Image (cartoon, rainbow, N blue to C red):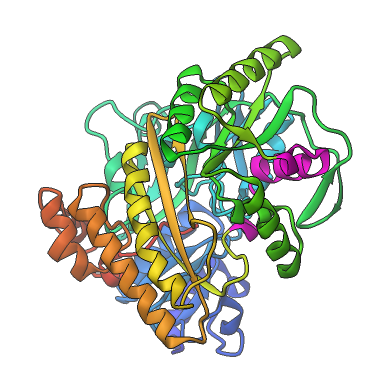
Amino acid sequence: MALDKEIYAAFAGVVGEENICDDPALMPAYFFTDFAAVVLPKSTAEVQAVVRLCNQFRLQFRPICTGWTGFFRPGTVLLDLRRMDQIVEINEKNMYAVVEPYVTSAQLQAELFKRGLCTNLKGAGAQCSAMLRGHGHLDQSMGADDRNHLAVEWVTPDGELVRLGSLGSVGEWFSGDGPGPSLRSLISSVVPPSCTPGVFTKVAMKLYHWPGPTRYSLTGYSPRYLLAEKPPNMMARYYSFPTLDQMWQAEIKIGEAEIALELMGFNVAMVAANITTSNEEDEAMFKRLSQEVQGPGFFVIIAGNSPDDFAYKKKVLETIIAENEGMSLKSVEDPEIEGILLTQCTRISASVRETFRPGGNFKSIPIMGQRDLTIRWAVGAGQAKLPLIEQGLIADDGGGFFGWGVEHGHLGKTEIFCKFSPLNPEARKAVDAWAEQQSNRALEEKYFALTMGPPEQIDSKVGPALSNYHLWWYKVLATLDPNEVIPDKGVSKLHP
């Protein structure tokens, strides 16, 4: 679907002829061939102008930045934000960084390391936008989700510019709230339909102290980067436990002591994936590690600000592990493997392989809430997978669920996978049924809300379970989007 010449000229008048395209021969570069056009704005003012043109001509639009394109209706105008790629400010004193959409987490982290700072990179990977909200490996010590969004510059679906938090009141970026009523809930996409209508053009991200090196000294090639020299006062370990309760009690104590830079409840399948370079190596390592562990476990990184601080944290960790009969995985104690995991899990390149190990496609169910409750839910969901494994419909991944504490255990996340062959329609059907059943169980048992559910599911199940908030959401969206330029009631993830 190409634009009319007059409409095309209007967009080109905003961004320049070289920054708009409706050539169907080029559309496959965006994994989709039926856009009305791709438009590349350079500034907030250009984003506003493009959005207002979409309203004028009643064209639906969707923004993307670092490439997770999602799904698009035919005829959508795609706002490719790759020209908005500046780190606007790194404020070391007040510990925040202001970024545009196309700044990647890796780009920002490299600059922060030089200053003894870091931010919580999301589990989607360091190649994603630094402003992406969500969860990642450093949740334990660096907060998570919308907690790290401070002030925000936001273009609404009708093209208005809104400056949220302290930016709107005093012109500074240090706070996401007040004075006065806060719009954080509206723009955070925490509740279904998990979207932020409109476009983020600048976001201030909260920063944290980084006790590690200003840069890692690496050799080798992706994904097996090797540490030429291990940073002082840092350690990575994997511990397994006889029972799930003992693992959970160790998590609680580590959180109370606030000694962990990172704590991730990996299963051994994910550990194997992160230290190997091929499917064959992965399968062999998975079998080896499965024989070494005594039960469920977690991966932990500690980092000291000094030799004495490191020694203290290490002693506390070892004491907690011993009290709960934990056992260190000897393979991870190997300096080479420890170095691989240390760098991958702080730079967040680990996610590239950990969820895509042999087994084909995967479907996951993420839930948030009190960590022990989410663990109990995941155990039930894992038990429901056993018949599918026995029938050969899904891969045996050694348990398949993992999770971690957020802010030293004040909150938690648990996620469970089903991995199956995309060429087996029976497997796909069985996995879909499993996912629906377990998602409904999570909702009914008050573990979480189906934050990425389709509109009909939100209307029939999620909304009524959460004080009919969805009715208010639709009223807000109707006000923000009078010309219906946001597709599918805005049911889409924030552009990562």
Q: Is residue 351 magenta?
A: yes
Answer above or below: position of 339 versus 113: below
| Quadrant (top left/top right/bottom left/bottom right) for the N terminus | bottom left
Q: Whole-percent x and y of residue 59?
A: 34, 76
Instruction: From the viewer's side, name the closer residue of 247 and 52.
Output: 247
Residue at point 80%, 29% (across, down):
231
Give coordinates of residue 477: x percent, y percent.
Answer: 21, 58
Quadrant of res 326: top right
Is residue 366 something that shows in the picture?
yes
Q: Residue at x 68, y 19 (%)?
A: 304
Residue 79 relative to residue 342: left or right: left
Q: Tell whether 431 sits left or right of 273.
A: left
Q: Which portion, as a residue range, is magenta? A: 330-354
**Total count of labels:** 0
Give me the residue at 72% from left, 9% from top.
Answer: 308
Report the side of 474 relative to 347 (left or right).
left
Does the magenta portion include 193?
no
User: Measured from the top left, where is residue 383 in percent x and y?
Assistant: 37, 59
- Does the magenta stretch mainly form a helix, a strand or a loop? helix
